[in-house]
Image (cartoon, helix red, strand yellow):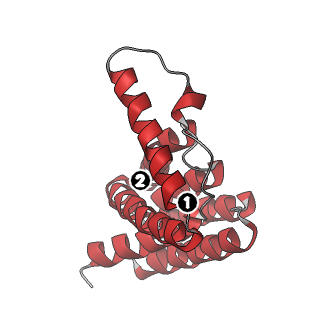
Amino acid sequence: MSNAFDFALLWLVLQAAVTDLAVRKIPNVLVLSGLLLALALHGTLGPDGAWLSAWLAGMLAGFFLFLPLYIVSGMAAGDVKLMAMVGAFSGPSLACEIAAASILAGGVLGLLLLAASGRWRQGLANIGLLLAAWMLRLSGVRVPLPVMAGGASVGGMPYGVAVAIGTAIGLWSARGA
Protein backbone atom coordinates (compact mmCIF):
# COMPACT_ATOMS: atom_id res chain seq x y z
CA MET A 1 0.00 0.00 0.00
CA SER A 2 1.07 3.52 -0.54
CA ASN A 3 1.35 6.57 1.63
CA ALA A 4 -1.90 7.82 0.07
CA PHE A 5 -3.77 4.93 1.70
CA ASP A 6 -2.16 5.56 5.08
CA PHE A 7 -2.65 9.34 5.00
CA ALA A 8 -6.30 9.11 3.95
CA LEU A 9 -7.07 6.42 6.52
CA LEU A 10 -5.37 8.27 9.37
CA TRP A 11 -7.16 11.49 8.45
CA LEU A 12 -10.55 9.74 8.41
CA VAL A 13 -10.08 7.91 11.73
CA LEU A 14 -8.86 11.15 13.31
CA GLN A 15 -12.04 12.86 12.12
CA ALA A 16 -14.09 9.96 13.49
CA ALA A 17 -12.32 10.17 16.86
CA VAL A 18 -12.87 13.92 17.18
CA THR A 19 -16.52 13.61 16.20
CA ASP A 20 -17.03 10.68 18.56
CA LEU A 21 -15.51 12.69 21.40
CA ALA A 22 -17.63 15.74 20.62
CA VAL A 23 -21.06 14.22 19.93
CA ARG A 24 -20.63 10.51 20.77
CA LYS A 25 -21.45 9.47 17.20
CA ILE A 26 -19.55 8.48 14.11
CA PRO A 27 -21.36 9.99 11.13
CA ASN A 28 -22.50 7.60 8.41
CA VAL A 29 -21.42 10.14 5.80
CA LEU A 30 -17.84 9.93 7.09
CA VAL A 31 -17.84 6.14 6.91
CA LEU A 32 -19.48 6.06 3.48
CA SER A 33 -17.06 8.68 2.14
CA GLY A 34 -14.19 6.62 3.50
CA LEU A 35 -15.49 3.44 1.89
CA LEU A 36 -15.80 5.16 -1.47
CA LEU A 37 -12.36 6.77 -1.14
CA ALA A 38 -10.84 3.39 -0.27
CA LEU A 39 -12.52 1.85 -3.32
CA ALA A 40 -11.17 4.64 -5.55
CA LEU A 41 -7.66 4.29 -4.12
CA HIS A 42 -7.72 0.52 -4.55
CA GLY A 43 -8.91 1.01 -8.11
CA THR A 44 -6.12 3.42 -9.00
CA LEU A 45 -3.23 2.35 -6.75
CA GLY A 46 -4.16 -1.19 -5.74
CA PRO A 47 -3.10 -4.49 -7.27
CA ASP A 48 -4.16 -5.01 -10.87
CA GLY A 49 -7.17 -7.26 -11.19
CA ALA A 50 -7.59 -7.73 -7.43
CA TRP A 51 -8.48 -4.21 -6.32
CA LEU A 52 -12.18 -4.95 -5.79
CA SER A 53 -11.53 -8.16 -3.88
CA ALA A 54 -8.91 -6.45 -1.69
CA TRP A 55 -11.36 -3.67 -0.84
CA LEU A 56 -14.28 -6.03 -0.24
CA ALA A 57 -12.30 -8.60 1.79
CA GLY A 58 -10.88 -5.87 4.01
CA MET A 59 -14.26 -4.25 4.53
CA LEU A 60 -15.91 -7.55 5.46
CA ALA A 61 -13.04 -8.51 7.76
CA GLY A 62 -13.26 -5.21 9.61
CA PHE A 63 -17.03 -5.46 9.87
CA PHE A 64 -17.14 -9.03 11.14
CA LEU A 65 -14.29 -8.49 13.63
CA PHE A 66 -16.36 -5.96 15.59
CA LEU A 67 -19.87 -7.29 14.88
CA PRO A 68 -19.91 -9.69 17.87
CA LEU A 69 -19.18 -6.78 20.21
CA TYR A 70 -22.14 -4.89 18.77
CA ILE A 71 -24.40 -7.94 19.11
CA VAL A 72 -23.70 -8.18 22.84
CA SER A 73 -24.10 -4.39 23.24
CA GLY A 74 -20.39 -3.88 23.81
CA MET A 75 -20.16 -1.11 21.23
CA ALA A 76 -22.29 1.00 18.93
CA ALA A 77 -23.01 0.35 15.26
CA GLY A 78 -20.92 3.35 14.22
CA ASP A 79 -17.83 1.70 15.70
CA VAL A 80 -18.49 -1.46 13.68
CA LYS A 81 -18.97 0.55 10.49
CA LEU A 82 -15.80 2.52 11.22
CA MET A 83 -13.81 -0.70 11.54
CA ALA A 84 -15.31 -1.88 8.23
CA MET A 85 -14.02 1.32 6.64
CA VAL A 86 -10.59 0.77 8.19
CA GLY A 87 -10.56 -2.74 6.76
CA ALA A 88 -11.55 -1.44 3.33
CA PHE A 89 -8.37 0.65 3.33
CA SER A 90 -6.01 -1.79 4.99
CA GLY A 91 -7.09 -5.20 3.72
CA PRO A 92 -8.10 -8.20 5.80
CA SER A 93 -4.73 -9.11 7.32
CA LEU A 94 -3.90 -5.63 8.56
CA ALA A 95 -7.54 -5.14 9.62
CA CYS A 96 -7.05 -8.00 12.09
CA GLU A 97 -3.95 -6.34 13.54
CA ILE A 98 -5.67 -2.97 13.73
CA ALA A 99 -8.74 -4.50 15.40
CA ALA A 100 -6.53 -6.18 18.03
CA ALA A 101 -4.66 -2.93 18.67
CA SER A 102 -7.98 -1.05 18.86
CA ILE A 103 -9.37 -3.51 21.39
CA LEU A 104 -6.24 -3.14 23.53
CA ALA A 105 -6.42 0.66 23.23
CA GLY A 106 -10.11 0.49 24.13
CA GLY A 107 -9.30 -1.53 27.23
CA VAL A 108 -6.72 1.02 28.38
CA LEU A 109 -9.08 3.92 27.63
CA GLY A 110 -11.88 2.12 29.47
CA LEU A 111 -9.72 1.69 32.56
CA LEU A 112 -8.69 5.36 32.42
CA LEU A 113 -12.32 6.46 32.12
CA LEU A 114 -13.30 4.14 34.97
CA ALA A 115 -10.55 5.61 37.15
CA ALA A 116 -11.54 9.16 36.23
CA SER A 117 -15.20 8.55 37.04
CA GLY A 118 -14.49 6.78 40.34
CA ARG A 119 -16.89 3.92 39.49
CA TRP A 120 -14.46 1.06 40.14
CA ARG A 121 -16.85 -0.80 42.45
CA GLN A 122 -19.71 -0.85 39.92
CA GLY A 123 -17.29 -1.73 37.12
CA LEU A 124 -15.96 -4.73 39.04
CA ALA A 125 -19.50 -5.80 39.93
CA ASN A 126 -20.44 -5.67 36.24
CA ILE A 127 -17.43 -7.80 35.31
CA GLY A 128 -18.47 -10.32 37.97
CA LEU A 129 -22.00 -10.48 36.56
CA LEU A 130 -20.68 -10.97 33.03
CA LEU A 131 -18.29 -13.71 34.08
CA ALA A 132 -21.02 -15.51 36.03
CA ALA A 133 -23.39 -15.32 33.06
CA TRP A 134 -20.70 -16.61 30.69
CA MET A 135 -19.88 -19.49 33.04
CA LEU A 136 -23.56 -20.41 33.19
CA ARG A 137 -23.78 -20.31 29.40
CA LEU A 138 -20.67 -22.47 29.07
CA SER A 139 -22.26 -25.03 31.39
CA GLY A 140 -25.36 -25.16 29.17
CA VAL A 141 -27.70 -22.85 31.08
CA ARG A 142 -29.45 -20.47 28.71
CA VAL A 143 -28.97 -16.95 30.04
CA PRO A 144 -30.80 -14.16 28.17
CA LEU A 145 -28.63 -11.43 26.66
CA PRO A 146 -30.01 -8.65 28.91
CA VAL A 147 -28.75 -10.60 31.94
CA MET A 148 -25.35 -10.94 30.28
CA ALA A 149 -25.17 -7.16 29.88
CA GLY A 150 -24.38 -6.87 33.58
CA GLY A 151 -25.54 -4.25 36.06
CA ALA A 152 -25.82 -0.50 35.93
CA SER A 153 -23.66 1.11 33.28
CA VAL A 154 -20.51 2.85 34.37
CA GLY A 155 -20.69 5.07 31.31
CA GLY A 156 -20.07 4.96 27.60
CA MET A 157 -16.82 5.34 25.77
CA PRO A 158 -16.06 7.08 22.48
CA TYR A 159 -14.65 3.96 20.81
CA GLY A 160 -13.74 5.93 17.69
CA VAL A 161 -10.74 7.16 19.71
CA ALA A 162 -9.64 3.57 20.35
CA VAL A 163 -10.01 2.72 16.65
CA ALA A 164 -7.94 5.77 15.70
CA ILE A 165 -5.19 4.79 18.15
CA GLY A 166 -5.34 1.16 17.00
CA THR A 167 -5.13 2.24 13.36
CA ALA A 168 -2.09 4.40 14.01
CA ILE A 169 -0.39 1.57 15.92
CA GLY A 170 -1.30 -1.01 13.27
CA LEU A 171 -0.02 1.12 10.41
CA TRP A 172 3.12 2.03 12.30
CA SER A 173 3.94 -1.60 13.08
CA ALA A 174 3.07 -2.81 9.56
CA ARG A 175 5.22 -0.18 7.88
CA GLY A 176 8.17 -0.85 10.17
CA ALA A 177 8.45 2.75 11.30
Residue assigned mark 1: 39
* Quadrant including the C terminus: bottom left
**Apparent side of residue 158 relative to residue 4 in the rendered image (left or right):** right
Give the number of callouts. Answer: 2
Three-letter amino acid code at disc 2? Ala
User: From this viewpoint, is residue 6 visible?
Assistant: yes
- Mark 1, Cα crowd under 10 Å, few <14 / some 14-19 / many 20+, is many
User: From this viewpoint, is residue 1 visible?
Assistant: no
Element assignment for label 1 = helix
Residue sitting at the far bottom:
177
Residue assigned mark 2: 54
x 57%, y 79%: residue = 11
- Of callouts 2 and 1, the N-terminal one: 1
Mark 2 and mark 1: Cα distance apart in space: 9 Å
- Mark 2, Cα crowd under 10 Å, few <14 / some 14-19 / many 20+, is many
- Residue 34 image point, x, y percent: 61, 65
Three-letter amino acid code at disc 1? Leu
x 74%, y 61%: residue = 29
- Residue 155 image point, x, y percent: 63, 58
Q: Quadrant of residue 1?
A: bottom left
